[in-house]
Image (cartoon, rainbow, N blue to C red):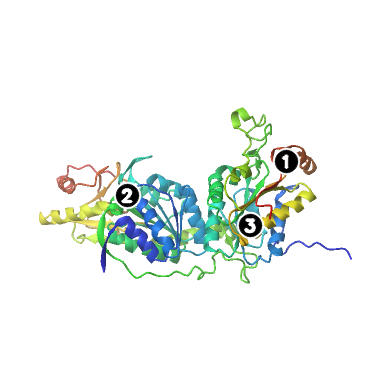
Amino acid sequence: MKRLMKGNNALAEAAILAGCRFFAGYPITPQTEILEYLAKNLPERGGHFIQTESELAGVNMVLGAAATGYRAMTSSAGPGFSLKQEGISYMCSMELPAVIVDVMRYGIGLGSIMLGQGDYFQAVKGGGHGGYKVPVYAPASVQENVDFTIRAFDTAEAYRTPVLILSDGAIGQMAESVELPEGREHDPDQYDWTLKGRDAAHPTGRKMTDRIYYDFKFHEYDPHIRERYAKMEKELQMWEEVETEDAKIILVSYGISSRVCREAVKTARKKGWKVGMIRPITLWPFPKKAFAKTNSHAEAYLTVEMNACGQMVEDVALYGRGVPIYSYPSGRSIADPEAILQKIESIMNGEEKEVF
Amino acid sequence: MAAVKKAPSTIYGYNSFCPGCGHGIVIRLIAEVVEEMGLAEDAIGVLAVGCSCLTNRYLALDLLQAAHGRAAASAGAIKRCRPDKLVFTYQGDGDAASIGIAETLYSAQRNENFTQIIVNNGVYGMTGGQMSPTSLVGQKTTTSVKGRDPEIMGMPLKISELISHFDVSYLARGSVHDAAHIRKTKTYIRKAFETQMNQGGYTCVEIISPCPTNWHLTPLQAVDRIEKEVLEYYPVGEIKGGAR
């Protein structure tokens, strides 16, 4: 049965359905409904909800809960997400599964509390220290908030890694009809590595720490890390193709901006223009397999995203090798479909300046 | 036949603390209490960053190495998820009272059900002896080269007194500079652990400990300094929950 739900609420409900029984977080717009929904619903359904004194405490509580085998989540936005990075780096090093949500807003520093796509760099490029990588899912609808949250928990455990959901203020605040799956129970005792007191297999206790210290010889650690991320990069890429087979101009866009691009593709096709779209669903690993298919026939990639200078466009330039790259950072407003069509026209007329 | 005092089996291998350091004594007290309570298979420790890290290689318990200052947050979460285990942190004064002061005070404020062990030696030991929140007035460190000047650096911070503002279950300050204080400190740790496992609620033992290396004293001079100077500013005793 379909229900009408706000994006943030749907994401929070999906976490409970995925078996998440631990949430620790801090209020920040436009993420706060996740916190509020779980404050009410998680304790009623056997889980722990803690409003922490800071995002630092929140993410480090999630780290502790994850170490016991619980499915655990925290969420934030922009400036608050910056504070989560410390814990994310530690969880990457300890190889702990958890889900961290960033309901993006716009701007540098305090920025604006309104919708935006300001956090591509800090989510996708290992915003914390040490050069880690984390799978990042970018939902573009309330239904995808549900689907990708559940998928994020499964990915986190399958690869023993924190996983990010990069939502945005628009997806978080809008209401759409969603289909919710059956709920699942998660057994925190199913894994041998979780903290539960020493046993015969661990006579000196389990050591939950940066794995570099205890689990690898000096020369074994780097290959382990490389292999770990190479496996994720190979296996986790997700994307959607919209009319790309014969497209000469391909829009590249994710999240809320991709919804406008989808409309722009329709309108362009009606005009007889060969326009398509690649919508990255995982931002890391970036869906380079999609670009490998289109690089041979594409004559331009136009990246559309909601920030001041363009961020994802750098990855498009990296993987769209040999194809001219154009950028439409729509700034503080959602991209205007008319403006996208004008950009496309000006690219076709050779009037638009390449950015890479 | 003379009584033989064996080291607890929960301690394995050798520690790498400096000569005269108090950490080894505190770890041993924790190990003894854990074993006496029959909880060696049911204990989870959370280690701070600093010299506390070194504990990881010789305490035979499940251990989580937390981020700097965040041990209390992670420990609170672990206890919520594993309520029947004994959960404690092992932190220094820099970790618990400076970078982690919010996590410490809010664990107390929420009455999180774990035990915080704070080893207070008045310096950042691992990084080579910088001023910590608990360095005494006049104490020379690499970042207070002329001695701690309260006009510029403020007064030494009393973390236990700050914690005492909250309705916590047990709170005490001990010291490990001589045998009598070591024995007393062990009873504090035991009471804290028992309180956690029986009534529940936040429990904390702050422990004054020598750091001869970074105090630039011999081990005996360091003991003397604790007796004559440190305990004057940081008096030992039970602060909350002692009278039962």
Residue A8, by quadrant, is bottom left
Q: Are marks 1 and 2 on the same chain?
A: no
User: Is A315 rendered above or below residue A185?
Assistant: above
Q: For the point 68% across and 66% down, which residue is it?
A: B38
Residue under numbered circle 3: B56
In this view, the residue in front, B145 or A38, is A38
Q: Secondary structure at mark 1?
A: helix
Label of residue B231 in the image: 1
Q: For the point 32% across and 49% down, which residue is it?
A: A312
In this view, the residue in front, A273 or A282, is A282
Q: Are marks 3 and 2 on the same chain?
A: no
Q: Amino acid at mark 1?
A: Leu
How far apart are the two marked residues, 1 and 2, measured between alpha carbons?
Answer: 58 Å
Q: Amino acid at mark 2?
A: Met
Label of residue B122 in the image: none
User: Is B242 rendered above or below residue A332?
Assistant: below
The chain to which mark 2 is attached is A
Residue A250 x %, y %? 22, 54
Say which of marks 3 and 2 sits in front. Answer: 3
Q: Is A215 displayed left or right of B242 in the figure?
A: left
Is residue B72 in view? yes
Marks 1 and 3 in Cβ contact (< 8 Å): no
The chain to which mark 1 is attached is B
Residue under numbered circle 2: A312
Q: Residue furthest front?
A: B244
How far apart are the two marked residues, 3 and 2, measured between alpha carbons?
Answer: 41 Å
In terms of sequence position, does the residue under pointer 1 or pointer 3 come before the other?
Answer: 3
- Of the 4 image quadrants, the one containing the C terminus of chain A is top left
Q: Secondary structure at mark 2?
A: loop
Residue B211 x %, y %? 71, 43
In this view, the residue in front, A236 or B150, is B150
Residue A258 x %, y %? 25, 54
